[in-house]
């Protein structure tokens, strides 16, 4: 655990269990090397990219990574059982392993379901655990591709309210102090980040200042909730510059989702965690 994460947990002890689960997952994937995935021909994805098609849905990319990611997912889930897990998680992991071991087609189906973003009809009855581990497997497998994609894509051209990699809606944003930097949105699934206009709701595209509001949180000066009266959605917004990986990770601010619910706001950003 980093010093920043340790300090954050000490100030927010109710997040300790989810933080421990994150550490256990990271440990399960540590040292595992995924198979190689071919780099896309960027010229073949331009047209769909400009039309707003995320990378994982862009047919020109021809990623064909499902088999490699599925194998990594199986290996990590097997290693997960070596750690100290709650009984319910241990049972779910065993069920997932049994499904993944059955065939390569099962492993591909698991990855395809995770990417689809469809919370219904998971291929195996442990959808929650599959989503968490599946996204980790996908991002680890595609790490070189995603790094190159981030350099290739035109940030100022995308400027959409959904993730340029997987198409998910963002649960978290960042606005750096000083007001000169663009607002960044962060994906709760593949952990990508991208620019978005300073004023406007990424969920319904409402940009009427009269229909947008800021909910400041006295006990949490590093965050605020940017809310929209049009769709009743909200965006957890980090107001700092340091420890980006921690503060844009979604799990580290789950207590703000609980606060938003108390204000009768609706979580529209995609999250791997249920309250």
Image: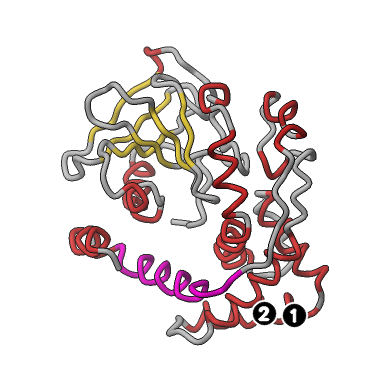
Number of labels in the image equals 2
- Residue range in magenta is 15-33
In the picture, residue 222 is in which quadrant? top left
Assign the magenta stretch its main secondary structure: helix
Q: What quarter of the picture does the C terminus occupy?
A: bottom left
In the picture, residue 216 is in which quadrant? top left
Q: Name the residue: 34% across, 53% down.
A: 246
Q: Name the residue: 57% across, 54% down.
A: 143
**Residue 97 disc label:** 2
Q: Name the residue: 79% across, 79% down.
A: 102
Q: Is residue 58 magenta?
A: no
Residue 120 versus residue 224: which sits nearer the camera?
224
**Residue 237 disc label:** none
Would you place residue 265 above or below residue 50 in this image? below
In the picture, residue 16 is in which quadrant? bottom left
Do the residues under discs 2 and 1 have CB atoms within 8 angstroms?
Answer: yes
Q: Name the residue: 23% across, 30% down.
A: 177
Residue 37 placed where, x, y %?
70, 57
Q: Residues within 10 Å of mark 2 (few under 14, many from 20)?
A: some
Q: What quarter of the picture does the N terminus occupy?
A: bottom left
Residue 88 placed where, x, y %?
52, 79
Would you place residue 194 above or below residue 251 in this image? above
Residue 122 versus residue 156: which sits nearer the camera?
156
**Residue 101 disc label:** 1
SS label for mark 1: helix
Alpha carbon separation for disc pair 2 and 1 = 6 Å
Residue 128 placed where, x, y %?
58, 64
Q: Residues within 10 Å of mark 1 (few under 14, many from 20)?
A: some
SS label for mark 2: helix
Residue 245 placed where, x, y %?
37, 51
């Amino acid at each position: 655990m980093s010093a920043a994460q340790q300090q954050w947990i000490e100030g927010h002890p109710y997040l300790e269990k989810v933080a421990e689960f994150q550490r256990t997952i990271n440990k399960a994937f540590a040292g595992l090397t995924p198979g190689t995935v071919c780099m896309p021909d960027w010229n073949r994805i331009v047209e769909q990219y400009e039309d707003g098609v995320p990378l994982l849905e862009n047919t020109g990319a021809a990623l064909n990574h499902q088999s490699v990611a599925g194998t990594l997912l199986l290996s990590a889930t097997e290693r997960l059982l070596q750690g100290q897990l709650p009984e319910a998680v241990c049972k779910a992991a065993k069920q997932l392993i049994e499904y993944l071991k059955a065939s390569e087609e099962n492993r591909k189906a698991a990855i395809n379901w995770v990417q689809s973003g469809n919370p219904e009809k998971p291929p195996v009855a442990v959808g929650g655990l599959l989503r968490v581990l599946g996204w980790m497997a996908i991002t680890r497998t595609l790490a070189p591709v995603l790094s190159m994609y981030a350099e290739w894509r035109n940030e100022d051209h995308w400027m959409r309210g959904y993730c340029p990699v997987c198409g998910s809606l963002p649960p978290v944003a960042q606005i750096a102090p000083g007001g000169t930097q663009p607002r960044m949105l962060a994906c709760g699934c593949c952990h990508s980040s991208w620019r978005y206009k300073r004023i406007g709701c990424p969920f319904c595209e409402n940009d009427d200042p009269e229909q947008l509001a800021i909910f400041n949180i006295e006990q949490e000066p590093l965050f605020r909730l940017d809310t929209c009266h049009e769709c009743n959605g909200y965006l957890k917004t980090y107001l700092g510059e340091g420890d980006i990986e921690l503060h844009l990770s979604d799990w580290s601010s789950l207590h703000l989702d609980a606060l938003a619910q108390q204000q009768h706001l609706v979580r529209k950003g995609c999250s791997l965690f249920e309250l």
